[in-house]
Image (cartoon, rainbow, N blue to C red):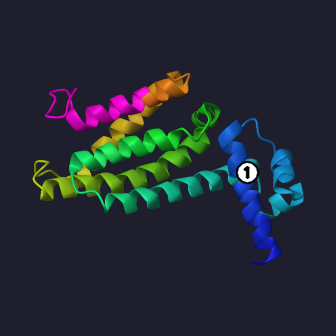
Amino acid sequence: MSQSEIKYNRLIEKAEELFIELGYKSVSMDQIAEAAGISKMTIYKYFSSKEELFLNILQSIGDRSFIYIEDQMKKIDGTIEKIDFLLHFNVEYSKQFSLTFYKDIMDNPYIIDRLMKEKKRMSKIIFEDIIRNGVERGEIRDVDEAFMANMLITLIDSISKNFFEKITCRKELEDFTENFYDFLKYGLLGGKGAK
């Protein structure tokens, strides 16, 4: 690995750590440069702005989680089990990010727009897979999987916009996620696993 690659990898690693812990707004390019042991000029060699660096970090985080989810989904048979896995993964995964990190994303229309486009693309693949497998197993009635996946994404998008800005602590975020997944699994009418 070249010196340039080593510097770049250290930059990404330290920037991600700082953004996750302190959020987007509180972290300066000077802090990132110092943590990575590089000059600020080196950062600007790779990224034109803090926003571009942050978007790159978000993309990397999203890509890693998507690859992990896809890999795990291949090992899980049942529809409810897949939804349970998503619930537990999202609750546990979200614990590594500060509430400030989430709030800073929600407060920046450009960043949230870019993030949501990518999240919708990934969610569509995951939901279509769950629905298709559920239909094949007879656990879900025969439906248009693309339409249903889009409905779920629209629901999540709408709920996110209306609820996330009201969340003030990690417990509220975890409760929201758990209740939402309970609704996805059992709906309003309940089912064999409903509370």
Question: Compared to 87, does 1 lie above or below?
Answer: below
Amino acid type at circle 1 is Ala
| Residue 77 sits in quarter | bottom left
Question: Compared to 187, does 122 lie above or below?
Answer: below
| Residue 191 sits in quarter | top left
- Quarter of the image with the C terminus in it: top left
Whether residue 6 sits left or right of residue 136 in the image: it is right
Q: How many marks?
A: 1
Disc 1 crowd, CA 10 A, few/some/many (<14, 14-19, 20+): many
User: Which residue appears at 87% of the width and 50% of the height?
Assistant: 34
Q: Position of residue 8 (x, y in %)?
A: 76, 65
- Quarter of the image with the N terminus in it: bottom right
User: Which residue appears at 60% of the width and 31% of the height?
Assistant: 99
SS for dot 1: helix
User: Which residue appears at 31% of the width and 63% of the height?
Assistant: 74
Q: Residue furthest bottom?
A: 1
Which of the pair 13/112 is nearer the observer? Answer: 13
Is there any visible trace of residue 23 in the rendered image?
no
Whether residue 96 sits left or right of residue 146 in the image: it is right
Query: Was residue 167 drawn as part of the magenta stretch in this picture?
Result: no
User: Which residue appears at 45% of the width and 61% of the height?
Assistant: 67
Which of the pair 63/153 is nearer the observer? Answer: 63
Query: Was residue 181 drawn as part of the magenta stretch in this picture?
Result: yes
Which of the pair 104/150 is nearer the observer? Answer: 104
Q: Position of residue 7 (x, y in %)?
A: 80, 66
Is there any visible trace of residue 19 in the rendered image?
yes
Q: Position of residue 23 (x, y in %)?
A: 68, 37
| Magenta residues, start to end | 175-195
Whether residue 165 sits left or right of residue 51 in the image: it is left
Q: Which residue is mark 1?
A: 15
